[in-house]
Image (cartoon, grey):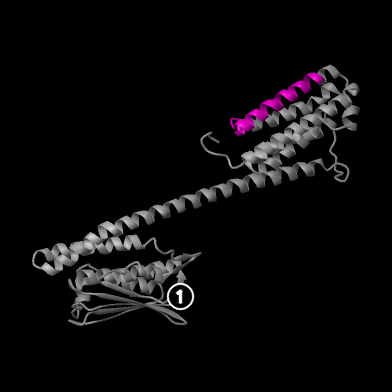
Amino acid sequence: MPASTPDPATPLWRAAQVFRLLSCIYALYFQIAVNADLQRPALGWLLFAVLIGWSAACAVAYLQGFGRRPAWVLTEVAVVVALMLSTEFVASDQWALDNQSWPTTLWATNATISAAILMGPIPGMLAGVVVMIASTVVKGFINYDLGRNATIVIELAVGLAIGMAAQTARHAHTELERAARLAASLEERDRLSRQVHDGAIQVLALVSRRGREIGGETAELAELAGEQERALRRLVSSGDSEPRTGEMTDIGALLRRRASDRVSVSVPAEPVLLDAGVADELYSAAVNALDNVATHAGPDARAYVLLEEVADSVTVSIRDDGVGIAEGRLEEAVAEGRAGVAKSIVGRMNWLGGSAKLNTGPGCGTEWELTIPRR
């Protein structure tokens, strides 16, 4: 792991080096106790010096961070196995049968711990198995009596437990970083929202209002300013609510985003939860209907959105007080290749298993009723 990136498992690495120190102390005690029984005691002390030197190097490497790499851990496993197999050179076969391997299995467990912290529970358990295979080779037989020799169980348990602890620490660190980024993003959004609301939105609202009062050529500029004001209000208000609840979405929260000086939105006080995919499609159909109001209903038309929830269905009504749609106009639009209503509204609702009903007429405005059944 790069030095610039903090390692969430650092406390485990520190604790592991404390265990390494204690295991070296035990290995020294063991060396003093059995040295007289070894075939080559001088070679035993020489290899013990190698053991201490390697242990010190590992402790520094893991504490400083540069050793927290697969290559270093694999090298540690190889050194541990080599020292365990060296039992054949320093002790007799009978000594190997009567005792644990020359470098104690407690010290050899350091390799299992290092693999578990760096790579997780499975590699940690595999390192424990490798250590036990080396011990079995030294003794020359497989000891199946777990009641008298539970070393393999201990090695597997250490690899599993420490590996899961390291894995959990890294996952928790990732989630904490994600939450911190989200909190910072929301705080920045709030700050920008306040600035936009206090500046650009108020200026655009003033331009829109004064332009309509003056009339004439400035009316077009007023309309453009009004459109930008509504777009900014939708953008700012989109972060004010969190519509999703697990895999459900509050369709009311989505519709409230479309509220503006020309669009009135009425929704129930309680959330109206739908499947997230269904809510997104229903919202898209409603947005298409509102876009049609802005485009075709007339410059002074207002739209009214009403969300209703009954036991077995949800209905979104979009009504405007504009010029309405002449009879046969929708059919002409389809024939001309402009199938926005047919696909974006009616097609969506049919795909959802619901319905889209249109009531309109010249000078009577339009009203869409978008209904989906509850599942």
Q: Quadrant of residue 279?
A: bottom left
Determine whether 178 is above or below 212 in the image.
Answer: above
Measured from the top left, where is residue 226 in percent x and y? 21, 64
Q: Which secondary structure type mostly characterizes the magenta part of the structure? A: helix
Q: Given the current orientation, which residue lies at the most extreme front position? A: 198
Q: Quadrant of residue 232?
A: bottom left
- Indicate left or right for 358 with 244 as reference: left
Residue at 29% across, 58% down: 198
Work out whether residue 339 can be spotted: no
Packing grade of label 1 (10 A; few <14, some 14-19, many >=20) is few
Measured from the top left, where is residue 372 in percent x and y? 41, 77
Q: State the residue in front, 207 or 62.
A: 207
- Indicate left or right for 366 with 46 as reference: left
Q: Given the current orientation, which residue lies at the most extreme top position? A: 42
Span shown in magenta:
45-70
Q: Which residue does the numbered mark 1 point to in the structure image?
A: 270
Q: Quadrant of residue 130?
A: top right
Measured from the top left, where is residue 191 in percent x and y? 37, 54
Q: State the residue in front, 150 or 340.
A: 150
Work out whether residue 59 can be spotted: yes
Determine whether 38 is above or below 146 in the image.
Answer: above
Residue 195 magenta: no
Measured from the top left, where is residue 233 in percent x and y? 30, 63
The amino acid marked with disc number 1 is Glu
- Indicate left or right for 347 with 175 as reference: left
Residue at 33% across, 60% down: 235
Which secondary structure lies at badge 1?
Answer: loop
On-image quarter of the N terminus: top right
